[in-house]
Image: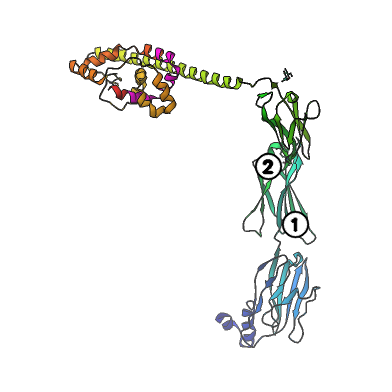
Amino acid sequence: MGAPRSSCAFASLLFCLLSAAIAQRVKVLDEVTGYLGQEVTLPCNFVSTGNEIKVSLVTWMKEAAGRKQNVAVFHPDHKPNYPLETEQGRIRFKTQTLEDATLIIGPLRMADEGTYACEFAAYPLGSEDGTTNLVVLAKPTNTAEAQEVKASNLELPVAVCISDRGKPPARITWQSGLNGNATVSEVTNADGTVTVTSYYRMVPTKEANGQRITCIVEHKTQPQPEALPVVLSILYPPEVTIEGYDDNWYLSRNEATLKCTAKGNPPPTDFIWSTANGPLPKTVEVQGDILLVRNVDASVNTTFRCQATNRVGQVSTDQVIFVRDKPNLEGAGTTGGIIGGLIAAIVAVAVVATGILICRQQQKNRMDREEDDQEGPPAYKPPPPCQLSDETEPVPTPSEAESIPLKAPFYEPSTTDDLFGGVAATTMEEAPRYHELPTLEEREAAADAGPSMEDEYLDQINPIYDALSFAATEEEAAMAPMPTDKAFIMSRAMYV
Ligand SMILES: *[C@@H]1O[C@H](CO)[C@@H](O)[C@H](O)[C@H]1NC(C)=O
Ligand SMILES: *[C@@H]1O[C@H](CO)[C@@H](O)[C@H](O)[C@H]1NC(C)=O
């Protein structure tokens, strides 16, 4: 303030001082945001530094569409006046002083939005003002719901999401794994708010029934988008099935039941039982979706029909009943056949696998022999093949494990008990043992006689013969030791 003062002539010192300071005397906010239906405060203060300036009148004016209208006027000799106001007390000064002209408006209307000028009439300088822009927002009410439609192959709206009375208009999107798209429309309401409506449209298949999609509403008044889940409701007629027929209804059988089940939207609740020829035989009892036959006789040798109904349609399905003279034992025979076939298949696989492994082993042995014939050190020496007499490696390597099935016939029932459980164990006990192994004493004796004896003994066994005779003679016994290498690894320890 020193600079303006020094440049001023003495006569106009006062004026100079005031003009430098006056721009800062009216304190307002540039912009104020209010919410529809709530109260908003427009601050305005006159900062007085001394007695030189006399304020006589405070006026709030609203500028809308290029016109200025007086909104509120205060003179200390009179009551405050609100020329525009029709509703008592909606617009009011916060205090009734000439220094603080803060205005309160509420409940806010959309029409209150605009530019407001707060003006002080001061002597000797005349009027001075500050302007505030009032923005009115409206928080929308968001809802989403399914549109019940019948399943069809025409695109239809299956869900609707509404953001009602927002300002500015909300943005609506959909989150969905379904193959649909949205159509949005906006309507401006009388109060200046906007209602946004979005329909989610798709081809309503019955598979879409019960699927969840989500409406996402974004709005300036919401810190985060609002997610509104919708579970689709596609109406479709009942899909009816009759369950419980076991193909074993025979004369004088007690308690045979049929159950009618029906899917549909809405879920069918009414079931009507009949026969293809008309009414039900007297001997059957109906308990809702259950048809109960306490005693099977010739009268139920017919075709039963269940009809299910929902709002969309009425559908029925038939079940043909064949009443036999004697119980049907075929079912058990079929099961036995399956088991037999399974065993045969396992045996066949085992035989083929054993054959392949034997082939490989023989090839390997041949290669090793050829290698040994070569003179000079070979560039690469493959790991030694598994020998039947190899006693120094209790833990087999993968390549060794391949060769292990050669020893398949030498299983020991006691070692497989744990592996295959009681059933396997009983069949094992009955299984004949091929190639009786030498007892411990015999083997010790053999070892004393010379280290090569045991090797020779084992080499004499033709592995192909072993595998084939073994598999063909006793199917069940084969099943037990063949499938896992583990059994062979363990049995190996028995004679090593
Ligand atoms: C909605 O999607 C279908 C295909 O999914 C398309 O044919 C149709 O034009 C889309 N409608 C709009 C309004 O985008
Ligand atoms: C049930 O009907 C079939 C023919 O539909 C007939 O062959 C069969 O003998 C009938 N059973 C009884 C128990 O009458």
Q: Name the image colouring.
A: rainbow
Q: Position of residue 76 (x, y in %)?
A: 73, 85
The residues bearing labels 1 and 2 have C-alpha atoms spaced at a distance of: 31 Å
The residue tagged 2 is 210
Quadrant location of the C terminus?
Answer: top left
Q: Residue at x 35, y 22 (%)?
A: 412
By secondary structure, the bulk of the magenta-drawn segment is best described as helix
Give amino acid for label 2. Gly
Between label 1 and label 2, give the one nearer the viewer. 2
Q: Is residue 444 left or right of residue 209?
A: left
Q: Residue at x 39, y 29 (%)?
A: 418
Q: Position of residue 67 (x, y in %)?
A: 78, 69
Residue sitting nearer the eye, 102 or 219: 219
Relative vertical location of residue 245 with respect to residue 204 in this rendering, above or below: above
Q: Is residue 482 visible?
A: no
The residue tagged 1 is 194
Mark 1 vs 2, N-terminal side: 1
User: Was residue 92 drawn as part of the magenta stretch in this picture?
Assistant: no
Residue 237 picture quarter: top right
Q: Quadrant of ligand 1?
A: top right
